[in-house]
Image (cartoon, grey):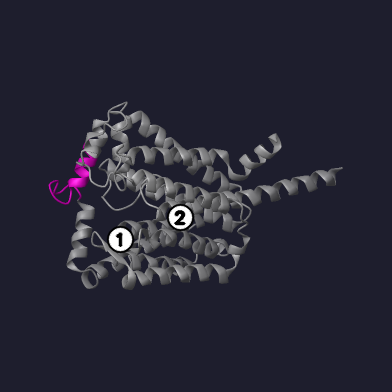
Amino acid sequence: MKRVINHWLNKYDITMIVAILCIFLAGLVTMSSFQAHDNYFFKQSIWIVISLVVYFLASRVEYRFLRSTTIVVGIYGILLSILTLLFILGHISKGAQSWFNLGGFSFQPSDLMKLGLIILLAKYFSRRHIEISNIRHVIVSGVYAAIPFFLIVLQPDFGSAMVIGAIWLGMVLVSGISKRHLLAVFLIGFVTFSLAWKLVFKPYQKARIMNFIYPLQDIRGTGYNAYQSTIAVGSGGLLGKGIGYGTQSRLNFLPEYKTDFIFAAFAEEWGFIGSFLLLLFYCIILYKLSRFALLAESNFEALFTYGVMIWFCTHIIISVGMNIGIMPVTGIPLPLMSYGGSHLLAECLALGMCVGMYGYARSGHKNHLANEFVGLE
């Protein structure tokens, strides 16, 4: 029995599971208003259960089949097709056409697109990491990222588009780009954005970008959310106001406290100590991912895991940063904590895939050591 339990804990990585569950619990407690008519807690609980099932199932799969170009390109093409369909069948909410509304269920395909792009770039760079000094590979990979980037920008969803760009840039850096080529990439990006500003973006899209850059310029209008968020975080003090006693969130001074500004609502009720522990759980997940990448079976698994790590880092930095007033406000959820099913499913799927890749890499390493030991005898 003990051997079965140890095998189960090692198979699914108990440290990762504990960190994930603690973040899940923090999100549930923060978004619940403790009122009978509030069903956010119930809906999020269902999403958490489904996401955990996805995590456990994904942890049991061997992902060597993703080294096939045909499969990877197929996944990328399907996800691009779904993104394109948004402009025909997508539901417009708060000025952005980013969701499919399926009755009582809404689905945001950009979350899965981030994972699909990571798979594609991991496949591309795993075979060309030695030749990454060739600018051609940087450009080709940039085109792969640019297509979903602009499809998401046109929704418009600047937050998700920014994450797509960060994933590409981070994976290029991990692969070993030269400083000269990196400078060329930034220049190309600047020129592309300038042309899009002049020729592509509509007036309301330009206004969104300006509000994105200067969130506190108008605290009674476009900067209201950011201003209330900083008040909520500051009022939490060292130990917080207590569960259910966050005045900024519970009295609706802080909008979207269940999604974009959930960290501010959590910090108000749990204070600096609680916020530190929450960030510690995120650091545990990032540490485990970095360890998985270092012990990966091949370049593909290592690059994929680094890509997932970059994805999570980007979300955490931007989400927490905008909650404390040092980053522009955008609709980026805090991983594993903000309300919503699409991002929870994508995040748990990605983490499960990383655990699965680490599992068969570790098994292969043990078999290799066993064969060496037998050879010595």
Res 45 quadrant in image: top left
The quadrant of the image that shows the N terminus is top right
Residue 60: where, in percent of width, then height?
A: 61, 52
* Above or below 235: residue 118: below
At mark 2, the secondary structure is helix
At mark 1, the secondary structure is loop
Mark 2 neighbour class, 10 Å CA radius: few under 14, some 14 to 19, many 20 or more: many
- Left or right for 253, reference 265: left
Q: CA distance from mark 1 to mark 2?
A: 17 Å
In the rendered structure, which amino acid carries the disc numbered 1? Asp
Q: Which residues are magenta?
A: 215-231
In the rendered structure, which amino acid carries the disc numbered 2? Ala
Total marks placed: 2
* Above or below 126: residue 216: above
* Above or below 195: residue 1: above
Q: Which residue is mark 1?
A: 157
